[in-house]
Image (cartoon, coloured by chain):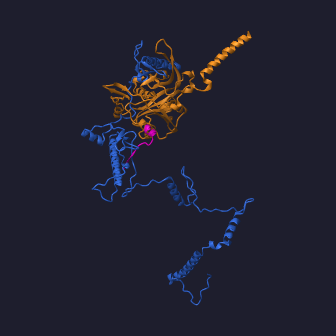
């Protein structure tokens, strides 16, 4: 684009960019405002040049205004991310290529012979659903104790597992080539303890809180003055749970302590008081206590025979209250 | 043991797809942050830059003490932020005694630092100090004109680098179609000396001229500052080669709902939306809106006026 003063501008209409390489600014600027004015005036010319090109493009009219098709930008700028790499073919794709198997488009809806209607291929109420089979006829090769339905479930699980493994292998190969699809992430999960197949259980929030509480009680002050992490809840009541009645009753209220004792006494002195006391249990407890005392005395004397100072056999044992 | 993780919501999936590398790239997102100490000028420059690039910029407000772009170890934080926010160009402002009012502009390739350029700010005039007719204030997110003037941009390698970085910074989204009514801003960069660049932001006034092309006028509205080149780091050759690589083949976009047949010719499919018969607007059947009523009212008015005239006579 040339102007009368033989200045060639480098225009990049795709970026709305204009570059004037020929202008020389005075090395000793007159004043700040003069300089600024000069800069703006030069740029105005550049903008005008770009606009000349822009407005001469064929524009389509829309509600918002005339729209023009911008040409692709000419300045070469570096990319921000790498060019997307091609995905390596999956194992099946390689096999299909080798054997010459073509992909065939499948219909969403398939004719079902059994119910004489069109059913969908995948999803709810599908054709040939494995779970729908009511009767499986026994073949000559079947063992008598085997459950064919369970066998079917097993086979399905195996198939699904195999597919998952293949999918993982394909994704690993893609990751190696740097072409993992954008929505997939391969993450390393925690390794199980050697020897076991099971995965370590994840601890929940409550369990963590309990364990932290346990650890806190092992400190010298019983965890009362520990610095709490942000978000950590104060410990639940760890001591004995006492419920004390008020000492002085309020105005008009009945004395609760008196009430309590009265209830107990009335129960004992009531007509059916014999039902409260479990006589059999009381007798058993008494007998057990007695036997313990007897055995306790005999055990003591038997164990420390040589160590204890010998008793005076002349003195008689005192009558102990039973 | 590896586990396949895929996003469970559609929104998460869309976000990941947006961040994936594309064949044809649309503009870069900018990350604006500041270092250990910032002066008033630097913080206002960063704020105004953020406002100018509102749609495609993220501004961090905390200070970052461990970011030193020109040192080998000090870039790790920047790369982490770039990965987190998916920003590939950053503006880092700081103020030290040795380098007062310092601004580091840097670009990333694959979330690794690609190149850096450090400039000092002088003679900064803020957005608010310019008075102009508010009618011409540029709207947010419009595509700007960028004008470079001066032989310095061609002869001096640092200025050449700065020109590239400023283009990337101010460019905005790369679009195919442009609305001509949405042209309302221009960035003016002039190389007033081999080390100094005068940068300002102007609004566009389109004035009527005789031809289709309107006459452009620039009104200074935005921040204006002098950028003094300090240090720069060019990308290394191999990285530059890789980043500049363009793929020649554009993927052919399949035209949807159009079919070509030898027998029928070109056939298109039109999908009709559901007709909600309950909510369709039929004519208003309310009593007051009946046509007969309106007409009779009009007639009555006429007869009344006639009567009045007669009585007045």
Residue furthest bottom as drawn: A314
Decide if residue B193 is in sight here.
no
| Residue B4 falls inside the magenta stretch | yes
- Residue A255 in the image: state x and y as whole percent: 72, 63
The chain drawn in blue is A
* B55 vs B73: above or below: above
Quadrant of res A70: top left
- Residue B110 in the image: state x and y as whole percent: 39, 36
- Residue A75 in the image: state x and y as whole percent: 39, 25
Q: In which quadrant of the rendered image does the C terminus of chain B lie?
A: top right
Residue furthest left as drawn: A99
Residue furthest right as drawn: A251
User: Closer to the camera, B270 or B227?
Assistant: B270
| Count of numbered circles in the view | 0
Residue in view at x 39 percent, y 54 percent: A192
| Residue A208 falls inside the magenta stretch | no
- Residue A11 in the image: state x and y as whole percent: 41, 20
The chain drawn in orange is B
User: Closer to the camera, B159 or A253?
Assistant: A253
User: Closer to the camera, B275 or B78?
Assistant: B275
Q: In screen coordinates, is A252 left or right of A164?
A: right
Decide if residue B280 is in sight here.
yes
Over which residues does the magenta segment extend? B1-15
* B62 vs B139: above or below: below
Residue in view at x 73 percent, y 11 percent: B311
Q: In screen coordinates, is A27 left or right of B268?
A: right
* A284 vs B62: above or below: below
């Amino acid at each position: 684009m040339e102007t009368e003063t033989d200045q060639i501008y480098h225009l990049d209409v795709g970026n709305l960019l204009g570059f004037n390489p020929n202008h020389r600014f005075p090395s000793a600027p007159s004043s700040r405002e003069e300089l600024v004015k000069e800069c703006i005036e030069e740029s105005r010319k550049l903008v005008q040049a770009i606009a000349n090109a822009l407005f001469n493009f064929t524009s389509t009219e829309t509600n918002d205004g005339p729209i023009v098709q911008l040409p692709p930008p000419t300045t070469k700028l570096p990319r921000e991310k790498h060019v997307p790499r091609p995905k390596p073919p999956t194992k099946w794709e390689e096999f299909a290529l080798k054997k010459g198997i073509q992909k065939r488009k499948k219909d969403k809806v398939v004719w079902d012979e059994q119910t004489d209607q069109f059913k969908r291929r995948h999803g709810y109420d599908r054709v040939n659903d494995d779970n729908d089979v009511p009767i499986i006829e026994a073949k000559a090769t079947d063992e008598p104790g085997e459950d064919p339905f369970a066998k079917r479930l097993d086979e399905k699980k195996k198939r699904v597992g195999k597919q998952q493994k293949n999918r993982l292998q394909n994704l690993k190969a893609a990751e190696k080539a740097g072409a993992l699809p954008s929505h997939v992430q391969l993450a390393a999960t925690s390794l199980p303890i050697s020897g076991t197949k099971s995965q370590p259980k994840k601890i929940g929030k409550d369990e963590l809180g309990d364990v932290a509480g346990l650890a806190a009680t092992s400190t010298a002050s019983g965890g009362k003055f520990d610095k709490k992490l942000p978000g950590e809840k104060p410990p639940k009541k760890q001591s004995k749970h006492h419920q004390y009645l008020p000492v002085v009753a309020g105005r008009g209220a009945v004395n609760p302590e008196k009430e309590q004792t009265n209830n107990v006494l009335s129960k004992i002195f009531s007509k059916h008081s014999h039902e409260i006391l479990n006589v059999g249990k009381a007798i058993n407890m008494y007998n057990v206590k007695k036997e313990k005392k007897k055995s306790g005395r005999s055990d003591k004397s038997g164990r420390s025979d040589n160590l204890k100072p010998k008793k005076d056999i002349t003195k008689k044992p005192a009558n102990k209250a039973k | 043991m590896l586990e396949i993780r895929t996003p469970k919501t559609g929104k998460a999936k869309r976000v990941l797809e947006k961040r994936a590398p594309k064949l044809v790239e649309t503009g870069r997102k900018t990350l604006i942050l500041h270092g250990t100490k910032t002066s008033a000028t630097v913080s206002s420059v960063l704020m105004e830059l953020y406002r100018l690039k509102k749609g495609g910029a993220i501004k961090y407000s905390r200070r970052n003490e461990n970011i030193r772009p020109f040192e080998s170890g000090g870039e790790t934080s920047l790369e982490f932020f770039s990965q987190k926010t998916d920003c590939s160009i950053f503006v880092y402002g700081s103020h030290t005694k040795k380098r007062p009012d310092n601004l580091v502009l840097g670009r990333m390739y694959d979330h690794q630092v690609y190149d850096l350029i450090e400039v000092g700010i002088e003679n900064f005039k803020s957005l608010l100090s310019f008075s102009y007719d508010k009618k011409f204030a540029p709207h947010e997110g419009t595509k700007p004109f960028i004008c470079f003037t001066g032989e310095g941009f061609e002869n001096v390698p640092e200025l050449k680098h700065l020109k590239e970085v400023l283009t990337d910074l101010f460019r905005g989204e790369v679009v195919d179609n442009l609305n001509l009514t949405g042209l309302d801003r221009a960035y003016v960069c002039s190389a007033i000396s081999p080390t100094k660049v005068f940068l300002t932001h102007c609004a566009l006034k389109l004035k009527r001229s005789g031809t289709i092309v309107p006459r452009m006028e620039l009104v200074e509205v935005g921040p204006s500052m002098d950028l003094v080149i300090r240090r720069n780091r060019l990308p290394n050759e191999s990285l530059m080669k890789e980043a500049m690589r363009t793929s020649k083949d554009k993927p052919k976009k399949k035209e949807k709902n159009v079919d070509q047949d030898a027998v029928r010719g070109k056939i298109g499919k039109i999908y009709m939306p559901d007709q909600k018969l309950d909510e369709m607007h039929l004519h208003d059947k309310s009593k007051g809106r009946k046509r007969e009523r309106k007409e009779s009212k009009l007639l009555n008015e006429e007869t009344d006026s006639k009567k009045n005239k007669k009585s007045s006579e």
